[in-house]
């Protein structure tokens, strides 16, 4: 299991498991001896091992001030690879789960005073922790736009309906119809009070927010993916990556990322999210045309940068500054 560097995995007890919306189950995890858990910050996730041996990442949605529990929400993905199904169907209260210490690829920029949160479906989880954190801080303003298919499939409606959040939460149901998707332009057209946007949801929603916020500084728009990006697209081909410093050329087959190919070649390359959202693997692009598949780079940065955890090439060869 990949965990926070140098931190051994935890064995945590399932203290509560409850279906809070259709197909969405909340798990509350505690130390079996009642000891405090490693601290986390809003936006953090843990990686946990499912009963069928897969590793899955889940954002923590409780108040980061709490040290006695981690709360996460699991959507039972009937079309997935079985990790969430095993977790929901084969885990009972009292079971022990192997869980990493919290890792945060989606931190709340607490220096800001104004925040626009955009959540799609189960992407509400890290944002819920952020809202809880902001309620403890003075002079912070935020508004949440929460998109989901229907009320029955919307988790945490009770928590978001409390009087303290009056006027701060907009909930939009599209019924699964793309023509009823929320229009983000009116809220992103103008950046007021140096606001930051934090968005977590399905790829399509994040892409819509990225496209609509192209005129914002890229440092003010933050994304967290809750699912792996597609590893291959139908017209993908093998590409060559040339390392400018050594002149070596590395083949990147279809289905392998540039990051994986560099590592297989013995290179030590930093990464974190590996979903094209955190910015850790940003690499200077010296030659060739990238096929950008990330949500980090602004349009003007795309000519000479590439996120090698997800992006590929439109030209047969790329030369990178390594
Ligand atoms: Fe996060 Fe590549 S590792 S964008």
Image (tube, grey):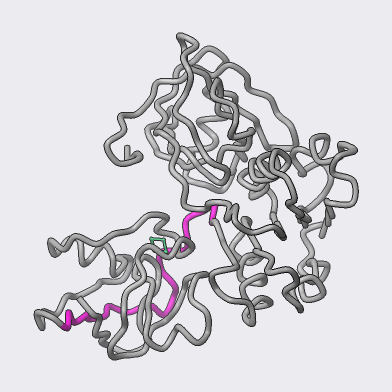
Q: Point out the residue furthest to the front here.
A: 138
Horizontal and vertical percent position of residue 225 = 54, 56
Task: Tell me if residue 311 is in the magenta stretch.
Answer: no
Is 232 located above or below residue 16 in the figure?
below
User: Which quadrant, please, contains the N terminus?
Assistant: top left
What is the magenta segment's predominant secondary structure? loop
Residue 73, picture quadrant: top right
Residue 98, picture quadrant: top left
Q: What range of the chain is rendered magenta?
A: 225-244
Is 249 located above or below residue 14 in the figure?
below
Horizontal and vertical percent position of residue 10 = 38, 24
Task: Tell me if residue 232 is in the magenta stretch.
Answer: yes
Q: Return the residue nearer the eye: 242 or 268.
A: 268
Horizontal and vertical percent position of residue 281 = 35, 65
Residue at the image position 44 percent from the left and 31 percent from the top: 50
Left or right of 166, for residue 244 = left
Q: Return the residue nearer the eye: 207 or 284.
A: 284
Left or right of 305, for residue 145 = right
Residue at the image position 59 percent from the left and 56 percent from the top: 111
Q: Return the residue nearer the eye: 108 or 83.
A: 108
Residue at the image position 56 percent from the left and 48 percent from the top: 79
Q: Return the residue nearer the eye: 191 or 202.
A: 191
């Amino acid at each position: 299991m990949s965990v926070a560097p140098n931190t051994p995995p935890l064995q945590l007890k399932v203290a509560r498991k409850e279906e809070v919306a259709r197909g969405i189950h909340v798990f509350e995890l505690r130390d079996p001896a009642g000891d405090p858990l490693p601290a986390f910050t809003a936006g953090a996730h843990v990686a946990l091992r499912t009963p069928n041996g897969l590793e899955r990442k889940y954002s923590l949605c409780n108040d980061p001030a709490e040290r006695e529990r981690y709360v996460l929400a699991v959507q039972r993905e009937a079309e997935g690879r079985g990790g969430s199904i095993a977790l929901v169907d084969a885990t009972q209260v009292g079971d022990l789960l192997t869980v990493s210490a919290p890792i945060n690829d989606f931190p709340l920029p607490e220096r800001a005073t104004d925040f626009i949160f955009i959540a799609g479906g189960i992407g509400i989880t890290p944002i819920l922790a952020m809202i809880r954190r902001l309620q403890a801080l003075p002079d912070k303003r935020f508004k949440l736009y929460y998109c989901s298919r229907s009320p029955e499939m919307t988790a945490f409606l009770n928590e978001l309906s409390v009087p303290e959040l009056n006027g701060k939460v907009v909930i939009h149901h599209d019924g699964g119809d793309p023509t009823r998707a929320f229009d983000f332009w009116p809220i992103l057209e103008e950046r007021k009070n140096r606001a930051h946007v934090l968005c977590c949801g399905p790829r399509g929603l994040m892409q819509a927010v990225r496209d609509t916020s192209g005129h914002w500084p890229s440092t003010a728009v933050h994304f967290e993916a809750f699912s792996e990006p597609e590893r291959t697209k139908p017209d993908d081909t093998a590409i060559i990556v040339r390392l400018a410093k050594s002149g070596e050329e590395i083949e990147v087959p279809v289905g392998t990322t540039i990051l994986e190919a560099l590592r297989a070649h013995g290179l030590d390359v930093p990464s974190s999210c590996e979903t094209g959202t955190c910015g850790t693997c940003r690499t200077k692009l010296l030659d060739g045309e990238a096929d950008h598949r990330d949500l980090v780079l602004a349009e003007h940065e795309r000519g000479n940068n590439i996120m090698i955890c997800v992006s590929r090439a439109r030209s047969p060869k790329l030369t990178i500054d390594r």
